[in-house]
Image: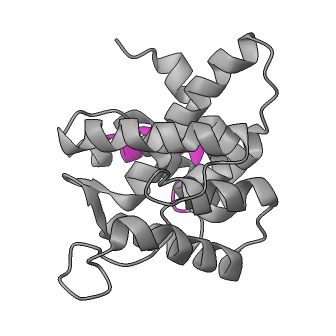
C-alpha cells in the first residue's frame, strides 16, 4: 500500500531539488522516449529519484550523511542521453555501455553539475561501466536504477502519483494552472 503523504513529500522534494532540470524543454523531451516497457525516460528518472530517496531515508536513520540535493539531481540526469535507444542503428547497439558518457556530456553542456552528480551519471551502469561508484549517492542511484528497471519492465506502477504531482508543479510554475483550477486539472488528468 502506497502512503499518499509520503509520496507527496517525495514529489515535493524531487521538484524542489530538480526544478531547474524538470522545467527545461530537454527534460520534457525525455517524456517522448521509452525506457523500459511503456515507461518513458522521464518517468524512469523520477522513479529512480524516488527509490534513491527511500534508501537514503533508511541509511540516514542509521547515521549516514547523504547529499539529498545531489542525489535527486544525479538521479534525474542519469539517463539524460536524449535519444530513442530502441531505434536500430550502430550507435545504439552498445547503449548499456555508452549512454552514461552521453548523458554526462549532455548534463555538463546544459547544467552546472557537481562532482557527486557527475559520478552518479557516469557510474550508474556499474558493473557494465568498469569503475564503481565513488560516493554513497552514486551507489544508491545505481541500485535504484536496477530496481526500477525490473519493475518497469514488468509494468508495475511505481511512480504514477509522483509523476502527476511533478507535472502539476511544473504546470503551476509555468502558469498553465492556477491553484483555483486544480480540480479542473485533476479531472482532465484522469480523462
Percent across and percent down for residue 127 are 46, 51
Hey, which quadrant is residue 122 in on the image? Answer: bottom right
Q: Give left or right: position of 159 versus 14.
A: left
Q: Residue at x 61, y 79 (%)?
A: 105
Camera-nearest residue between 118 and 44: 118
Instruction: Check the image and tell me how it is coloured.
Output: one colour
- Name the chief secondary structure element in magenta: helix
98 w.r.t. 71: above or below: below
The N terminus is located in which quarter? top left
Q: Residue at x 68, y 57 (%)?
A: 119
Q: Give left or right: position of 63 versus 147.
A: right
Magenta-tinted stretch:
176-187
Hey, which quadrant is residue 157 in on the image? Answer: top left
Percent across and percent down for residue 166 are 52, 47
Camera-nearest residue between 141 and 45: 141
Camera-nearest residue between 105 and 17: 105
Q: Give left or right: position of 63 versus 98.
A: right
Instruction: Check if residue 99 falls in the magenta segment.
Output: no
Instruction: Check if residue 177 falls in the magenta segment.
Output: yes
Residue 165 in sight here: no
Percent across and percent down for residue 59 are 68, 19
Q: Give left or right: position of 114 versus 1.
A: right
1 w.r.t. 188: above or below: above
| Extreme residue toward the bottom, this view | 90
Percent across and percent down for residue 37 are 19, 51
Q: Residue at x 52, y 77 (%)?
A: 102
Residue 149 in sight here: yes
Amino acid at each position: 500500500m502506497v502512503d499518499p503523504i509520503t509520496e507527496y513529500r517525495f514529489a515535493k522534494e524531487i521538484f524542489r531539488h530538480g526544478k531547474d532540470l524538470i522545467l527545461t524543454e530537454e527534460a520534457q523531451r525525455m517524456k517522448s522516449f521509452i525506457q523500459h516497457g511503456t515507461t518513458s525516460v522521464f518517468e524512469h528518472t523520477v522513479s529512480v529519484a524516488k527509490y534513491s530517496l527511500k534508501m537514503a531515508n533508511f541509511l540516514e536513520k542509521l547515521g549516514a550523511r547523504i547529499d539529498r540535493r545531489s542525489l535527486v539531481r544525479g538521479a534525474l540526469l542519469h539517463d539524460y542521453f536524449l535519444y530513442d535507444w530502441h531505434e536500430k542503428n550502430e550507435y545504439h547497439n552498445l547503449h548499456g555501455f555508452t549512454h552514461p558518457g552521453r548523458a554526462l556530456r549532455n548534463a555538463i553542456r546544459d547544467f552546472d553539475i557537481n562532482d557527486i552528480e557527475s559520478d552518479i551519471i557516469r557510474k550508474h551502469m556499474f558493473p557494465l561501466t568498469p569503475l564503481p561508484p565513488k560516493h554513497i549517492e552514486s551507489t544508491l542511484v545505481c541500485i535504484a536504477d536496477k530496481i526500477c528497471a525490473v519493475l518497469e519492465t514488468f509494468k508495475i506502477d511505481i511512480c504514477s502519483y509522483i509523476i502527476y504531482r511533478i507535472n502539476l508543479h511544473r504546470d503551476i510554475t509555468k502558469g498553465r494552472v492556477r491553484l483555483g483550477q486544480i480540480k479542473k486539472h485533476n479531472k482532465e488528468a484522469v480523462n
